[in-house]
Image (spheres, helix red, strand yellow):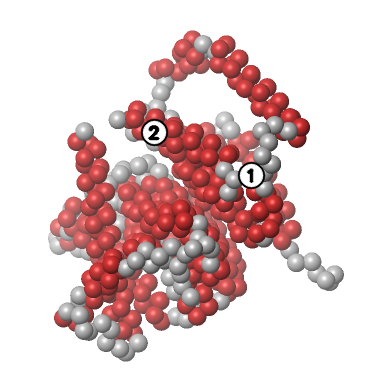
Amino acid sequence: MEQGIFVFLGIVTVTSAWFVAASQNLVRAVFMFFVTLFSIAGLYVFALADFVAITQIVIYVGGVLVLMLFTFMLSSKETLEKLEERKHKYFSLKQLPALLVAIAFLLVLVNAIFKLHPDHLQWITQSQNNTFQPQDNTVTNIGINLMTSYLLPFEAISILLMMALIGAAHLARKEQGND
Amino acid sequence: MNHYLLSIFVAVVLFTFVALFTTFGVYAERKISAFIQDRLGPMETGKFGSLQVFADMLKMLQKELITPLAADKALFALAPIVIFVAVYLGFAALPWAPGLIPAHINVGIFYILAVLSIETVGILMAGWGSNNKYALLGAIRSVAQIVSYEIPAGFALISVVMIAQTLDLQEISRQQGILSAENIKFLGFIPVKEAGGILAWNIFRAPHLIVAFVIYFIASLAESNRAPFDIPEAESELVAGFHTEYTGIRFALVFLAEYSMMFLVSMVGVILFLGAWNTPLPNIGAVKLADWTTGNLWGIGWIFLKSLLLVILQMWIRWTLPRFRVDQLMDLCWKVLTPLAFLCMLISGIWRLWLM
């Protein structure tokens, strides 16, 4: 049964992601992206990362996705139609760089998969006696790790977010005097 | 296999509860509004109009499902389902009694905040799918409001979580009564673990949590799009907001979502601030009122009663206060509630470190 749910989530993730990439209707693609994000959250739960799964929903569904939809609703219909226009050619020179990057990345991935021997990796064999159980509370673990081993990255991210906030406030501020 | 059958059974029970609560809630809302405005309310159908809601439901089920010609058909049809399911998912993690919780998860309160944010996607779906300017304006207003008010609500909840030191709703509930494993201090000084009752509730554990509760309550009104924060469906300006185009059973789903949201936010408030399933009666010497009134059945009764009181308070406010203007609404959120909520969180940290 668990395996069935896992396979189902996997199929939903892949097909919805494909729909997002292939769809001509941008707004529908964004709503389909919601399905993708949701099923990825489900896959995180299977990896016993319940906190990450819920954070994914809070940040991506509650934040990023809503922001994307807002930009659609505030932009005019003509802009959207221009964006949705698509030349019916499978290959053009414009797409060459993207195609090259995609092929190169695929080669790297395939190479990595063939060279990896997942059963004999050192950190996997070492960690076999040190695993999480589904009932374990991961939140305290995350908190302690954030405040000890990963304090510097955590602080760096907080400063980055602060900069983004100040930048947004500066952009949104009313210009005084010169209107 | 039994495990899965039980899960389905629990889901069906919760859905039945939500549906029953909505029928009751609509009737109560009409009667309360009638009382406040010095009217009689529904009186024709059944004794004191008690069958009015069932008549309305029958009417709604019979109605034709009209889809506007220019609407995005798939999004239009799916939106009410997404809106309702988002709220309904939240009920999965709420504890009802000391040994009764549909899904016991370690990150309960965080989960509820997450699934409630899905509702905004559903509302945007409805607004965009209807292809109607009132619906779109209503959806944008509604989402702007929900996203803004999530911040003070979230920080008010975090200030409780910092005192309780857990995200697990069942654990938070247990800490607020005689079943608690740790010591409880009334306002941080008087130990009340033995007495329990109303004195042990989180709202009285630290004075700033009273402020946090008020912030949460105001923000929860806005999150469920209730007056005085009902600018998304302001009848005088926007017809009916994001659900203008909906008819029949789809409209019923939107309505169901609104009423279950009211109960959900009230229940979350009760669990975090007002003692969850703990009894309000304290032990007084030999009269062990708290010991006598704690248990699974008592728990369900208490939590239901307390949530119902908050729901009635929401209705009372809706029919007493006039609607906010958009700028006043945002001013209240960003200039009053958010700084206050941040302050509450700061005090919570200090309180936990130095006073507990």
Q: Quadrant of the C terminus of chain A?
A: bottom right
Badge 1 is on which residue?
A158
Give the SS element for disc 2. Answer: helix
Q: Quadrant of residue A140?
A: top left
Camera-near label (2 vs 1) is: 2
Residues marked 2 and 1, same chain: yes
Q: Residue B341's spot in the image, x, y percent?
A: 52, 61
The residue lying at 30 percent from left, 78 percent from top is B30
Of residue B85 and residue B204, the one placed in the foreground of this image is B85
The answer to whether residue B298 is left or right of residue B118 is: left
Q: Amino acid at mark 2?
A: Phe
Taking A37 as reference, is A7 above or below it?
A: above
Q: Residue at x 42, y 17 (%)?
A: A128
- Kindly identify the residue that appears in the image at 20 percent across and 80 percent down: B45
Cα separation, mark 2 vs mark 1, equals: 37 Å
Q: Earlier in the sequence, mark 2 or mark 1?
A: 2
